[in-house]
Image (tube, rainbow, N blue to C red):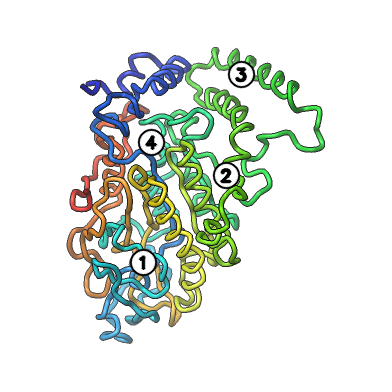
Amino acid sequence: MPLSFSRRDLLTTAGGGFGGVALAHLLAGEGLAGVPGADPAWPLGGIHHPARARRVIQLFMNGGASPMDTFDFKPALEKHHGEALGPKEKPEGFTTPAGNVMKSPFGFARHGETGRWVSDVFPWQARQVDRMAFLMAMKTTTNVHGPASYMMNTGFMLPGFPCLGAWVSYGLGRIVDDLPEFVVLPDPRGLPYNQKGNFSAGFLPARHQGTVVDPGRADPIPDAFAADVYPFARGAADRDTLALIQRLNRRHAAARPHDTRLEARIAAGELAARLQLTAPATFDLTTESAATRRAYGLDRPETADVGTRCLVARRLIERGTRFVQVWSGPQGAVNNWDNHGSIPKELPPIALSVDQPIAALLDDLGARGLLSDTLVIWTTEFGRTPFAQNNQGRDHNGGSFVTWLAGAGVRAGATHGASDDLGFQGATGITTVHDLQATILHLLGIDHTRLTFRTAGVDRRLTDVHGHVVQGILA
C-alpha cells in the first residue's frame, strides 16, 4: 500500500536544514518520496496517487501566441471583419483602445481523424493533432506580460513564489543523481519577461530552482569545467579543491540551518562534479543520426535553434531529468509572440522556428517509447484580441487562449472548452491557469491541494486556493 503520509509531513517531522534535505535525498534514493520504486503498484511514482507521467517537457511561447491565428479557427472574424465590435473603453492591460474586428490573414484546414482546425502557420504540428488534447478556453487574470508570465509559471501574479518546475522537483525529487531535476532552456536571444523569476524556487529550498542551460554555447553549463587558461585546476586538483570548498560550506551552513541557499550551493557543487562526467555526452548532438538532426530542423537556420533545444530536451528526459522547460522568444517588442505591429509579418517567422522542431519532438518521443511516460505541454501567458491594433497587429488578451497537452495520461484528440464566436472570451469549459496546474500535478501523481509548504505562517501551494483537475482531457 502507498505510504499514508506526505513528503512534506515527513520532512517537517524530520526537521529543517540539512536534516530535511538529507532525509529527502535518502528517501528519493530509496523510492519513498514518490519516485519510481516506491511500490510495485505505482511504477511511475506519485506521492498521493499512481502517476501517469514521470517527467515533463513544457514548451512556452513567450509573448502571447494568437489563438485565432494558430489553433482557434473563427469564421465570424471574416464575417465581421472591419466592424467596431470591441469594447468602447480601453480594458486594463490593453496597450491601445480596441480597433475593429480583424480576420486572420492565414488559411485554416481540418487535420487528422479528429478534424482539428489548424492555421497554415503550423503545417508540421497539424500532422500531430490526433496526439494532442486541446484546452480551447484558457483564461488568465491579467493582460500584462510580467504578471501573466508569473501566473502561468507560479500560480501568482507577484514575484517570490515557486514555479511549477520547482514544485515538481520538491514534491517528487530527482530520478537520477548526475543531472539536474529541473532544467530551463531559454531563447539564446534573451530571457523571457520576469527574467529568472519564472524559474525561481521562491520560498522552497533553493536547490529546486531551475538550472539554466544554453546548448548553443561551447560550455552549455557555465563553469562546469575550469577555463583553458587554468589548466592546473583540473583532475586531482579540481577534486581536491571541491572537497575543501564543500567542507568549508558545510561548516558554514551548520551554523545557519535555515539558509537554504547554503544547502543549494553544496548540492550544486556536488552535482557540478558529477556533471563533468555526464554533461559532455548529454549535450553532444553529433552522436545523433543525420536523419534525427534533419527531422528537428538542425540543418535549417530558421529552425536550428529551437530544434537544438527540443532535441536536448529529449536527451535530458531520456537520461533522467524530470522537468525541462523550452522557451520560444525573449522579452521585448521583437522576435517573440507579442505581435502588436503586424500579425501577417511577425507571426510566421516565430511560428516557423518552432513548428518542425515541436513536431519532431513528439515523433521522436513516440518512436522511443518515451511519450508513454512523458507529458508535453504547449502554452503561452495569454492570447491576443480579435480586434486590430496598428491596422494589422493584435493586442494582449487574457480572456481566451489555447494550450495543448500530449503524452502520458492525456486523452489523445480530446477538446475541452470553446471561446466565443470572435475568440475574445471563453464561452464554455473555461480552464483557468490553476486548473491547468492542478491537471499537470495530477498526472504526476500529486494532489495539488496537498502539496504545500509552510512559509510565514501560511501553507502555500502552487494553485493558491483554486484549481480543479480537467478530467475531460485525461485518458
Q: Which mark is residue 249?
A: 3
Q: Position of 205 compared to 422: left or right?
A: right
Q: Position of 382 compared to 284: left or right?
A: left
Residue picked out by circle 4: 167
Q: Which mark is residue 213?
A: 2
Residue picked out by circle 1: 127
Q: Mark 3 or mark 2: which comes first in sequence? A: 2
The N terminus, quarter of image: top left
For mark 1, give the secondary structure: loop
Contact? badges 1 and 4 (CB < 8 Å)? no
Contact? badges 4 and 3 (CB < 8 Å)? no
**Residue 335: percent from left, percent from top:** 54, 65
**C-alpha distance separating marks 1 and 4:** 33 Å
Type of amino acid at the residue the image marks with label 2? Val
Type of amino acid at the residue the image marks with label 3? Asn
Q: In the displayed structure, would residue 273 be above or below residue 102?
A: above
Label 1: few (<14), some (14–19) or many (≥20) C-alpha neighbours in 10 Å: some
Near-viewer residue (260 or 232): 232
